[in-house]
Image (tube, rainbow, N blue to C red):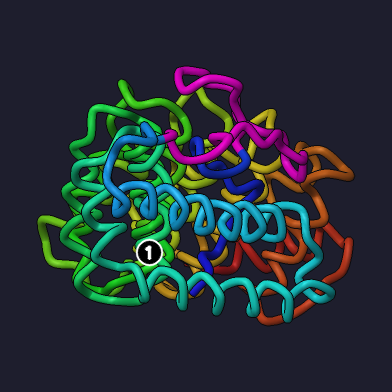
């Protein structure tokens, strides 16, 4: 159920986020704990409003509490230590969301912004294919925070029927704030990038290349990893240049991407290997070089340790 994350998870108002406002473009540093700025709770209802609406507020508050716990564990927890706790929290969320699916769907479609944010993230935990349609519709919401949480919901739902082209559009749209675009990248990876049709593949590659070249250092690693997952061999030169990125997380992602592409399509093993070996004496000795060496070992299926000359000889022998 949980998504694969690269660096810190950045969810909008429902989760820990890298920015103090929706429009901020600052991304979290690699491994940095980010601040909780989620809503204090569902928007209060007037006491004179019907019992059903007051009940909706109580249910949303309960779901919101569980979501906060889930996000806190996902972002700051130790997977080995907290894995069982995370499973319990997810199971509790599934139970709550499934029991009140209709109410959450109604709040996502008609509720005030804070309620829509909670419902958007919550519906993803239902595991119900019926959640796909309202979550996709929420991508058109006026609130970027609702859109970001709808993308979070889609990544948790991980429905294989999710149109990748819509997620790619959110990632590529430079008008969107960081939290929306980073959640779009995570949703793309969560729903899977195998056996794409021609239109989806073109849209995903275009969005990933845009992310790889984005000014925001928090988006560039997503671009590299997505290009690797779709095995976009035409992006090998761009990924080679990204090895020199001043942000270590970006350089490491580019290294991993090159190794994967060269491993999957052996016609590009030589290009990938030569890019990686050329970087060995140039990249940061402590933050990036160990990752490049590990990726070279994975690509070559052999280990020359820290012997740069042997790695260069290996790479030069390849076509």
Horizontally, is 229 left or right of 203 in the view? right
Given residues 15 and 42, the one toward you in this image is 42
The relative height of residue 53 versus residue 146 in the rendered view (above or below) is: below
On screen, residue 270 versus residue 248, left or right, reads: left
Q: Position of residue 287 (x, y in %)?
A: 82, 44
- Residue drawn at point x = 25 percent, y = 54 percent: 135
Residue 209 image point, x, y percent: 36, 40
- Residue 211 visible in the snapshot: no
Q: Nearer the viewer, residue 78 or 227?
A: 78
Residue at (39%, 42%) from the top-left corner? 117
Between 268 and 219, the one lying in front of the other is 219
Q: Is residue 108 above or below residue 160?
A: above
Q: Is residue 21 magenta?
A: yes
Apparent side of residue 57 relative to residue 306 in the rendered image (left or right): left
**Residue for point 70% across, 44% down:** 279
Q: Secondary structure at mark 1?
A: helix
Residue 13 makes an appearance in the image? yes
> Residue 309 appears in which quarter of the rendering?
bottom right
* Image point (11%, 61%), residue name: 198
Q: Indicate the quadrant where residue 310 lies.
A: bottom right
Q: Is residue 201 magenta?
A: no
Left or right: where does residue 142 sit relative to residue 208? left
Residue 41 sits above or below residue 295 on the image: above
Residue highlighted by disc 1: 124
Q: Nearer the viewer, residue 24 or 246?
A: 24
Residue 258 vertical position relative to residue 281 in the rendered view, above or below: below
From the top left corner, tell me how far across and down residue 283 is, in percent: 76, 39
- Please give the range of residues in magenta: 17-44
């Amino acid at each position: 159920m949980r998504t694969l994350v690269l660096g810190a998870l950045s969810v909008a108002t429902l989760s820990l986020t890298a920015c103090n406002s929706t429009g901020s473009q600052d991304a979290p540093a690699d491994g940095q704990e980010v601040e909780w700025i989620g809503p204090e709770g569902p928007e209060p209802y007037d006491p004179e409003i019907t019992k059903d609406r007051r009940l909706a507020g109580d249910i949303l508050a309960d779901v919101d509490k569980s979501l906060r716990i889930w996000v806190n564990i996902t972002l700051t927890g130790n997977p080995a230590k907290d894995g069982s706790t995370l499973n319990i929290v997810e199971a509790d969320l599934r139970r709550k969301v499934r029991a009140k699916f209709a109410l959450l769907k109604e709040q996502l479609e008609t509720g005030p912004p804070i309620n829509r944010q909670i419902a958007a993230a919550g519906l993803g935990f239902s595991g119900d294919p019926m959640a796909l349609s309202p979550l996709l519709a929420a991508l058109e919401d006026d609130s970027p925070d609702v859109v970001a949480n709808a993308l979070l919901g889609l990544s948790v739902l991980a429905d294989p029927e999710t149109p990748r082209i819509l997620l790619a559009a959110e990632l590529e749209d430079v008008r969107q704030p960081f939290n929306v675009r980073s959640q779009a990248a995570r949703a793309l990876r969560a729903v899977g990038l195998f056996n794409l049709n021609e239109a989806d593949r073109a849209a995903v590659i275009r969005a990933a290349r845009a992310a790889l070249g984005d000014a925001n250092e928090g988006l560039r690693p997503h671009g590299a990893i997505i290009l690797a997952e779709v095995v976009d061999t035409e992006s090998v030169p761009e990924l080679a240049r990204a090895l020199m990125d001043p942000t270590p997380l970006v350089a490491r992602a580019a290294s991993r991407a090159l190794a994967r592409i060269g491993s999957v399509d052996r016609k590009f093993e030589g290009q990938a290997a030569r890019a990686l070996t050329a970087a060995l004496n140039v990249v940061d000795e402590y933050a990036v070089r160990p990752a490049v060496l590990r990726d070279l070992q994975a690509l070559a299926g052999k280990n020359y340790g820290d012997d740069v000359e042997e790695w260069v000889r290996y790479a030069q022998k390849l076509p």
